[in-house]
Image (cartoon, rainbow, N blue to C red):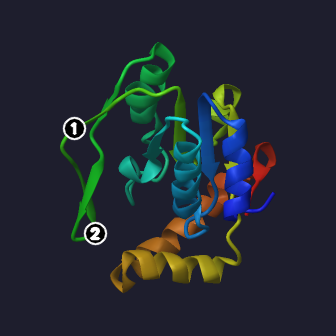
Amino acid sequence: MTGDVVGCAELAAQLRSGIVAIDGPSGAGKSQFADRLVAQLRDRGVHSVLVRTDDFATWDAPVSWWDELEDDVLQAFRRGHDYRYHPRIWRDGKAELGTRVWIRWEPLLIIEGVSSARRRVADRLTAALWLDGGSATDRLERAVARDGESERENLGRWQQFESGWFAVDDTRSRCRIVG
């Protein structure tokens, strides 16, 4: 399966409930893939909630925010409760806690972003998906185009961090490669 629309449609045909993680390095296309998957699910009448790890991560805490996602999203999903959390709002390159959001519970939760398929959650995932997204240089350029030239240095450091994270966590080996 590839990370194109056909791949999303095939995956959407299989999903009805559970937790799906869409992981891979920054700039790989995870957000676009997640958006296409949600659209395909909606077209099939499947209700889902999409939560992005970017709502939790910061430059200073690239993956150590997991307890917050666990408490506010994953435990709520398990109990069948609505999701309430404070997404990060970025101002001048710094993340601040935003206004609390309240999202209605649905039987399918999609978590998109770096470290979403981490070992700590692997046994609870219905599907773990991975996007490679090309070379580190290509991914960096896509991320800079998305976030702005002023973030190039932060994004370069982020790439170095996530490379080490994925090597230690061995995330990709547990995922279905979709692009």
Which three-letter amino acid code belongs to the residue tagged 1? Arg
Q: Which quadrant does the N terminus fall into?
A: bottom right
**Marked residue nearer the N-terminal end (1 or 2):** 2
Tell me the number on the disc at residue 93.
2
Q: Are marks 1 and 2 in contact (CB under 8 Å)?
A: no
Q: 61 left or right of 5? A: left
Categorize mark 1 by other alpha carbons within 10 Å: few (<14), some (14-19), many (20+): few
Categorize mark 2 by other alpha carbons within 10 Å: few (<14), some (14-19), many (20+): few
Q: 152 left or right of 7? A: left
Which image quarter: residue 28? Answer: bottom right
Check the image and report above or below for 18 versus 165.
above
Which residue is the site of mark 1?
A: 100
- In percent of width and height, residue 50 lies at 46, 43
- In percent of width and height, residue 74 lies at 48, 27
As helix, strand or loop, the secondary structure at mark 2 comes to: loop
Tell me the number on the disc at residue 25.
none
127, 38: nearer the viewer: 38
148, 2: nearer the viewer: 2
Check the image and report above or below for 147 versus 17.
below
Mark pair 1, 2: CA separation: 20 Å
As helix, strand or loop, the secondary structure at mark 1 comes to: loop
